[in-house]
Amino acid sequence: MCIKNLSCLHIIINGIVQGVGFRPFVYNLARQHRLFGYVLNDGGGVVIDVEGTDASLKSFVMDLEQKTPPLAKIDHMDIVSKKLQSYSAFEIKDSQTSRVSTMLSADISMCEECLEEFQDEKNRRFRYPFINCTNCGVRYTIIKQLPYDRKNTSMCDFEMCDECAKEYEDPTNRRYHAQPISCYNCGPQLFFKSSEGKILHGDSALQEVVEYIKEKKRIAIQGMGGFHLVCDATDDKAILKLREKKNRPTKPFAIMFHNLKAIDEVALLSQNDKELINQSRRPIVIVQKKENQILSAYVAPNIDVLGVFLPYTPLHQCLLDALSIPIVATSANFSDEPIITSEEEILNKLSTVVEGVLYFDRKIVNGCDDSVVMGINESYISLRASRGMMPRSFYVKEKGTKTILAVGAHQKNTLSLYFDNNIIVSPHIGDLNSLEAFEYFERTLEFFKKVYNFEPERVVCDKHPNYETTKWAKKYVREHENVELVEVQHHYAHALSVMGEYELDEEVLAFCFDGTGYGDDGLLWGGEVFLASSKEYRRIYSLQNISLFGGEKAIKEPKKVALALLFEIYTLEEVEALDIPLVNSFKKEELKTLFVMKQKSLNTPFSSSIGRLFDGVYALCGYLEPLGFEGESGMILESLAQKYESDRCYSYEVVDGYIEYKAMLLEIVNEKEKKYIASKFINTLAAVVLDIALEYKDKRVVLAGGVFQNKTLLQRITQAFEMKNIEYFIPKEIPINDGGISFGQIYFGLKGCNG
């Protein structure tokens, strides 16, 4: 080979490129193209020196970009030419720096190659509950610190046997440097403990759990990032008992099925749904129910959707292989508390809820709940981004001058960090309504600070003075010199989260509809239309205010929201004369008291929330009991709209900066076909959005906020946009609800602040 035909490239790759089989991928790719040099991990990612012919180098770089390992993600790649080094081979070198800024990767379900081995009776890992390779398995939930080496994970307690060590050290093997590598001889062990104190291990533990489920008993089972509460999803008594014990009267349970065919028997699946269910991230997918299904009606009462998913660990696969039924698999926790991650905590906190615990002796370092997504047209939205989806890094082209921490909202909390051109988003943390939940928030923050050697120079929070995250941010800034505090309005952060995901550096028309958020005027917002850029926003429309009896407590009492709406259009005497279930559910003295409260503004703050409007319409449809969970009113209205479709809408006005609902309410109260209220109401909201979008047709449109979790509403809006050629953006990887707030906050902290 003539030396004149040779070149040498120095390549630096940033992203999720450590602990995902990237170095052996590069090693084998270089050998395939007959190139020489080396590959190594450094604190920022992967460094490659590679030497060969120009044609081979060109092919190598193309394959490097297009054939990355399943779990790898290249955010940025720098390629420069350098002098020939006269390498004689290609090798994998050890790391040469202690600096850490590579990205954590999320946990991923068992890959197809591992599944084949798992099902192969001749394979030494046949039905091994912890089979994995570099293309699948646990990551975030077992890591203590970077770099991602076995000694820095909860696998440090398990010494590899000779056979596993041989695979681990072979660059041509897909288990090369797979940190959780193990087998029956050297890996974690299964245990079962009954509520009576009976203890079993190994196959006996698994078989006992199978029998317990068949006997309609309730079990806690350890997963990747926490425990599930499990029972037979076809048995009414088992599910009602679980609801009673967990104090969860109506909130739907997620269901795990053996395979896609089993889901197809109980749900109406689109091709998009099937792809979402089958993807390697294995999220819970919200799908449409079929009638006459085998599932218990109490799995998801009063609604027409199900949350379904497939086994994502080999242990789940073992369990479902042995059962002929789908199982409820809901997070093991009490309301407002984080998911439980140890068998000791299960036995301490949920001893009256479960009759046994299946666990293993590999510790969960970082709790991580299941992700939840919903198909929209040919895409999807995230309702909860966690296992399989987060943590995740987003590469930002322009470099900020400060490290930034965004602490998110009070509900569906997440954290985001910015440093070195990267935004890191944490998995779902949850609602911060309890001491345990806030301690979980603090533990998660400390982990990310430790793992990335991160200290914030700017902290971004919500403007709500009573959010625990806002209080924490203000206290942190007081205690740390030279740390800047930035407060971002809640709904503006919703808009920014979508703008950040799609890198929209322009003024957009943003519809931000949700349940609640602290407004610039001190009132509760939630039906907002902004003209927004990455630096500022202007509120151009909002929902006509609704009075909330008892303030934010009204969130759980939709009939009081509906009564407040009636007081907007009727006198007290006219309300008393209405012969409708809503009015009849109040005593006359109650009506008078509440009317006086509204007239005198006694503990009846205003809210512009579309979420509260949903509550009011829900009660006007005859649903008068307190809500069992957040968003229940919207889900039931969505089910009604699907069942009784209408192509009509109610009257409305969009004038003087307000979306007026009074005309609509009059028509709803006098509606003869009550069953069509939900569909016509949703059509009305879609028409309002379209009218405003047409008014600002030179602007691209952003949709964000928890109200857009309503699939019927979102699809009707997007279909109308497509008919009118309106360009729109809805979040995909970032949750559409408050789970996206921290990402929006950090986008402002990076783009909207000077310096």
Image (spheres, rainbow, N blue to C red):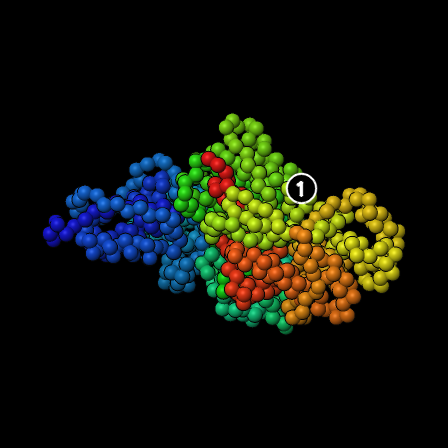
Name the residue beneath numbered marker 1. Answer: 521
Amino acid at dot 1? Asp
User: 741 or 122, which lies in front?
Assistant: 741
- Place of residue 694 in the rendered image (x, y in percent of width and height, measured from the top left): 57, 60
Q: Does the image show residue 401?
A: yes
- Place of residue 427 in the rendered image (x, y in percent of width and height, measured from the top left): 51, 47
x 51%, y 31%: residue: 483
User: 720 or 77, which lies in front?
Assistant: 720
Q: Is residue 200 above or below residue 299?
A: above
In the image, taking residue 218 as reference, residue 7 lies left or right, namely left
x 49%, y 46%: residue: 425
x 68%, y 46%: residue: 524
- Place of residue 294 in the rendered image (x, y in percent of width and height, measured from the top left): 61, 70
User: 751 or 462, which lies in front?
Assistant: 751
Choose top left, top right, bottom left or bottom right for residue 286. bottom right
Q: Residues within 10 Å of mark 1 (few under 14, many from 20)?
A: few
Choose top left, top right, bottom left or bottom right for residue 59. bottom left
Q: Does the image show residue 139?
A: no
